[in-house]
Image: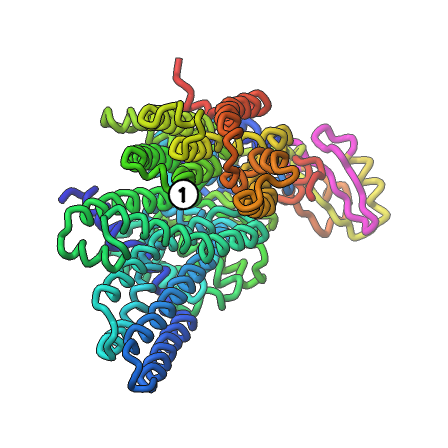
Amino acid sequence: MTRAGDLQLAGVVDNAMLYKDLTQWLRNRTFVFLFFGLLTVAEVITVFVVLLPPTQENAGAVAFGFLSAVLFVYAVIIAFLGHNLTAREFFNQTFELYELSGMSLERMAWGKLVSMLTQFLFGFFCLVPFMFVSFMLGGLDFYLVITTSVLLVLAVVPLYLLALFVALLSKSRQVSGVVRGVILVFVFLLLPWWGGLAIVGIAGFGGTGSPVEFMKSLMLLDPAAIRSTLIFLAFYVQICLLLFYACCNAISPSTDSRATAIQLISVLLTASYLALWCSWAWNGFATSTYAYLTYVPLALLFLILGLVTFYSRLDIPIMAANRQRRARFPVTRLVYACFHAGSKGAVKTLAICYGLCVASYALTLSSYGVTSFAAGGTPGVELHHAASTALQMPFFLAVPAWPLILAPQFRRNMAALRTVVLACWIVLGIPLMIMMIIVNERATYYGAVDGQVLMQGLAVLLSPLSSVFVLADGFVLMRIILGVGGLLGMDAIIRARVRREPICVPTEVLPQG
Amino acid sequence: MLRVEHLTKDFGPLRAVNDLSFELQRGRICGFVGPNGAGKTTTMRMIATLEEPTAGTISVNGMSLFDDPYRVRRSIGFMPDHYGVYPALTCEDYLEFYARAYEVPRGLRESRIRNIMEFTGLERIAAKPVESLSKGMKQRLNLGRALINDPMLLIMDEPAAGLDPRARVELRFLVKSLAERGKTIFISSHILTELAEICDHMLIIDHGRSVAFGRFEDIQKNLQEGTEITLRLLHADQVPRLELQLSERPHVQNIRVDPNGLLTFNFRDELARFPDLLRELLNAGFSIVECRHGALSMEDVFLKITEGSLT
């Protein structure tokens, strides 16, 4: 193996960040508390279940349920410990010292992630003997054990990446506190709900009923289950990679960037999702009651991508520019040309994703026909609602920022602008979202509510959270127009920024002669 | 070793560093002084690749910051004015971590860490948690970290800030011995007497601009109008007569007498000719009991150059 190969391998195996985080964890008192705490709780649960009346046939399942819950709580504790350590390091500029060592951003994020996973697996293996005991108690399906374990292991990777990302996203303790609160809501309320929906959806798509049934068919090498698993894994890997590079990007906003990777993965993810969506639509999924929610992941992707990459600096950081200049392979050069760092690159990527959405919309529209929508046919309406939800998102990226960008303090502090935009969405969106859910429920049973159109209009205009819940047909076209306007608005924001603060390029970077 | 040309950095409308140029040779210790907000830390951060210049070039050991920022990072040691946080990590773990981060080959790691601990005097506290160390010890550890990749250029931002007198003396000794080993040191401090003792070069900036750069003696010479001579007479009543006689001499200027009777003047001829003048004065009957010549102190130089804008 070459010297460069040796070094790359050393980065994975002999990772400095992994060494540091694990050493800190093992030397910390929290480790002792967690270790003995886990063992004590697991023992108490097992003894409690063993002492249940002998008539209890599902004692094993009860014990396993409790142990799984304990493991989930343990996983969340590890996420918060990792988050807190990383946030402290970030606030105190310790990451600058890591950067100075020449350690790559990937190596830093990878070390932190693997350290958290190691800590989780430590807890997992602590509980394995107790799970075995619960299995011996009877009433517990082997496939349930496997399914729960696999789902937990799969869930912790994005959870830990998310925890890292949140720690690196905010620059002050106060902002971090707010963002942490939002993420708490996300992790405990929304994530399990979406995860549950995804699992049910995948299980349904695989042709079986529950995740356990799905696991059974997968282990029996059922082609439908294998296909669904592969689709799931494709998305899972892309989402994890996206979060991973978002973490890398957040570490060094001043001299380095991973915006190219983020943009490339986002486009791939959008393309994959739209391909899946087209196949769902053609297979009649658009008739489902919740079909209008199928575009929510895309809307979310638009918003996250916009927040992370659009609200950033205009020019390309020095390290990223250097990498771009040194790209040897034509494919790499092409990728850098299409997806470059900076706000301009973000708009370009969003426009590509937008184009893909429009193309898939047009494709599925042709299968249902415009007349179906005009006539108010359910499949067509659901399809239009779903598509227009995602297509409106550039509007929300452009509008709250437009007046703020005129203020120099926001132009100089993009992190603050990002936080204000996010706060606008949440503060305005949550009350309107609740209102829209109530209005939708009442409208189903008692017909239209007074002022419904006004409320719907506000919900569509003020926040992406509330806009998703507006199901009136009249807003479909409006949403699409707002979305196109949003893309143009984003371009205008960049022009305004360039006009007010011209990009300064170091003299040596300028072409000579 | 370090070459900075027309370096400029803007933060919005504020120009923090303005067209700064200087060059440092190997083994030099260059003091970097300026009033608060003059752009010292920004300049150091730009050289350390932590900030991007708005314009200008920086090259370290012939490598340009723009051509290969990664290699520049690996070839410098930077000691910022903060330490970072390392809960539950011992001094040895800390150095081991940075040795891994800098990809010091496994075979070399142990000896490199041992040498650094020996050099910085950290062997006795190797197993102590980093967070429990005193400021002086933390600063030594910080220096150890900056040396772990055996850099040729060491950038130190306010290393003596907050240290007690003993720790300062020890730090001064460490810096001097590093320069003797051929390392170039670029050091900023507000404690000018410290710098005067260790630095052979000085760079003074004000409002982001370089106002003086070169050997300290040269800067002194440029600022000082001749050599400052102070005379003490046994009989104070001779002072006015001496003042009169000196004022008639062509190379004597700026004569002043302090309340204690000390007479000071600037001798603008070669210093080697001063004994002749002294002999003449003694022969003329002046009872001179003390004679000393002095240069401008670094504080004087700094205040003179920055026109009293020290804040």
- The type of residue carrying mark 1 is Thr
Query: If the image is split into quadrants, where does the C terminus of chain B sit?
Result: top right
Q: Mark 1 lies on which chain?
A: A
Q: Is residue A242 left or right of residue B206?
A: left
Q: Does the magenta stretch include residue B248?
A: yes
**Which quadrant of the view contains residue A318?**
top left
Pick the front one: B61 or A126:
A126
Boundaries of the magenta span: B247-276
Whether A174 is drawn above or below A22: the answer is above
Q: Is residue A140 left or right of residue A351?
A: left
Callout count: 1
Residue pictured at 57% horizontal, 29% vertical: B18
Query: If the image is split into quadrants, where does the N terminus of chain B sit?
Result: top left
Residue that label 1 marks: A289
Pick the front one: A301 or A215:
A215
Location of residue A78 in the rendering, given as x and y in whole percent from the top left corner: 40, 63
> In the rendered view, how is the structure colored?
rainbow
Location of residue A491 in the rendering, given as x and y in whole percent from the top left corner: 50, 23
